[in-house]
Amino acid sequence: MSLQQELKKIKAGQLAPVYLVLGEERFLSDTFKREITKQIIQTEDDELNFASFDMTETNLSLAVEEANTIPFFGDYRLVNLENPYFLTGEKGTGGLEHNIAELTAYLNAPSTTTILVVYANYEKLDERKKIVKLLKKSAVLIDVKAMEEKEVRQYLQQYIQNEGYDITPEAFDLLLRLTDMDLSKLMGEMTKILLYASDTKKILKPMIESLVPKSLEHNIFDMVTYVMEGRTEQALSLYQDLLLQGEETIKINAILISQFRLMLQIKIMVKLGYQQSNIVDVLKIHPYRVKMAMQQTRKFELDPLKATFSELVENDYRIKTGQMAKELIFELFLLNYSRK
């Protein structure tokens, strides 16, 4: 069932005895957790009826025992299971041996006064396991899988409209880029953005530029463009800014190597006829990162990309072997490249 549909039922007091929250989108998972907790834990006395168990640290038997306990001064007991790795193909690292039979027995006859919520922050579960089949059969499944780009765009646009704000296309696209199309990051930034634009109810690109910080990876993305287009002054200025922010030259160089390697891989794969979805499958990286790299790669030819990549790799060796001051090596790279 969709998150919004189930939240509507929960707010109406229609609670299921067992929920399985499955997926890696932390923002949606936290939204469910917040709303169901708000519904059940309303007073200080109700707090006695709440318990959360991390399955990497606590034995499953304790959680099942808690779920079988009658609520104290309340209608329901809320029990959360976090990191249930035994539902996947993963192995525990804490030396715990969970008695899955106890959970099986509980799911076959769940308490009518307990709400058990299993938060499975995984892409998928091991469908071969009997406990997984039973859990999916007995629980209300809440799908919080990572959203595709189209879904993230729709969610954000609807959220902004519901809050009574407008956003320009330029601001919208920049916000998505600076947060890597990650819904959790997006919503984490929205509070201060809405507050800043509260007078006009209009979100503009300069607001996003001033409020949403660029990550090192985003700055490196810009530096790639400056280097390849010979915009030395901007590349040097960005480099100095990164040093002032505490970044290390060797780290900057390493991330540049990684970005140029990605661009080379994508350039070659596109020439071979690969589509974006095929590239994502092969390289195992976020689709939005592939999309942005593809857009950037189209501007440049293969041979200059190869030459720059080779020079960066050589610089990495020279820095690590102390052949010259690392800052000088990198600045010479930027200066020399502008003359090519």
Image (cartoon, helix red, strand yellow):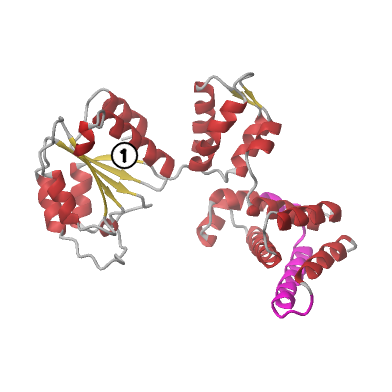
Query: Residue pushed farthest front?
Result: 44
Residue 141: image quadrant is top left
Decide whether residue 306 is among the magenta residues: yes
Q: How many marks?
A: 1
Q: Tell me which segment is drawn in magenta.
A: 295-324
Q: Where is residue 8 in the image (x, y as percent from the top left)?
A: 31, 25
Residue toward you, 234 or 54 = 54
Residue at x-position 71% and y-position 80%: 321
Q: Where is residue 15 in the image (x, y as percent from the top left)?
A: 21, 31
Residue at x-position 25% and y-position 59%: 86
Residue type for callout 1:
Ile
Residue toward you, 129 or 62 = 62
Residue at x-position 74% and y-position 77%: 318
Q: Mark 1 points at which residue?
A: 142
Residue at x-position 15% and y-position 60%: 99
Q: Position of residue 187 (x, y in %)?
A: 50, 36
The majority secondary structure of the magenta stretch comes to: helix
Q: How crowded is mark 1: few (under 14 residues within 10 Å), some or many (20 or more)?
A: many
Quadrant that contains the N terminus:
top left
Q: What element carries label 1?
A: strand
Q: In this view, does 58 lie to the left or right of 113?
A: right
Quadrant that contains the C terminus:
bottom right
Residue 323: image quadrant is bottom right
Decide whether residue 145 is among the magenta residues: no
